[in-house]
Image (cartoon, rainbow, N blue to C red):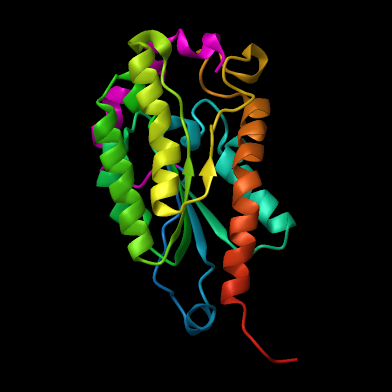
Amino acid sequence: MNQTWVAIVALTAAACGSGDAGQIRQQPPPGATVASPPRDTTARSTPPVPRIVVLGDSLTAGLGLPASQSYPTLLQQRLNDAGLRYEVVNAGVSGDTSAGGLSRLEWALQGDVRILIVALGGNDALRALPVEELKQNLAEIIERAQARGITVILAGMEAPTNWGREYDLAFHKVYPALAEEFHAPLIPFLLKDVAGIEPLNQSDGIHPTAAGARIVADNVWAILRPTAERAQQKRAPRGGS
């Protein structure tokens, strides 16, 4: 992992908006869509679009970018272009930890959610929170979602080396271990080919620019597309002309 990424802990913590996370969590995440009761009979006759929820922090929320340039929005465009019928819900909240994501999971899973992308852990690492807590929180998120028949994709994150090799290694191992335990597709590192590359990050050195967000979308799309295709095939009506 590029060392530029891991040397900016204090600045990153401030940029992630950690001080507001507790209050924000009481409201729908920025940019998220919420299912509303139909207002007329026409709406009632139209089946809801299956959802893909991206549960994350400021990297998912698209801090510093217009909503149209966040990677969840880019994923929506790619799904549309591929003829895959889903609604992407951006459930990213700046400053959120894995515990914060777990606390708002019930809200995030409203509606006909078929796929949950879990992109949490960056703020846990920045605050050097216990790795076992990260693992427990992510495991509970995955378990709850899978219990509802939702396919979970886990996005890996890396810890700053400031906390020492032991913490760094333990943190790194959480994601592949959970992916194996729960048979969940794994994005090895959400910020692959973006972290530490100056032109692809904003002035804080951590949140991607529009160009960086496109690469993040590439990283997610490589796993999401085959997952979404399989899920769509499973729900496709059989028979008929």
Relative to 226, is 200 above or below? above
In which quarter of the view is residue 30 placed? top left
How many marks do you count on the picture? Answer: 0
Which quadrant would the C terminus be assigned to in this image? Answer: bottom right
Relative to 86, is 224 above or below? above
Using the image as rendered, state which of residue 133 and residue 31 is in the foreground.
133
Relative to 38, is 216 above or below? above
Which residue is drawn at the image coordinates 42% and 15% (left, top)?
A: 160
Residue 19 within the segment the image draws in magenta: yes
Task: Tell whether 48 sits left or right of 110.
Answer: right
Q: Position of residue 34 (x, y in %)?
A: 41, 58
Q: Position of residue 135 (x, y in %)?
A: 31, 38
In which quarter of the view is residue 187 placed? top right
Task: Tell whether 20 sits left or right of 51.
Answer: left
Q: Position of residue 130 (x, y in %)?
A: 25, 26
Which residue is drawn at the image coordinates 38% and 13% (left, top)?
A: 165
Which residue is drawn at the image coordinates 48% and 35% (left, top)?
A: 156
In which quarter of the view is residue 37 placed? bottom left
Task: Tell whether 219 sits left or right of 105.
Answer: right
For the question of whether residue 11 can be seen, the reply is no
Main secondary-structure element of the magenta-colored stretch? helix
Q: Position of residue 184 (x, y in %)?
A: 47, 51
Which quadrant would the N terminus be assigned to in this image? Answer: top right
Which residue is drawn at the image coordinates 60% and 48% (left, top)?
A: 223
For the question of whether residue 182 can be seen, the reply is yes
Magenta range is: 1-30
Relative to 10, is 48 above or below? below
Residue 11 within the segment the image draws in magenta: yes
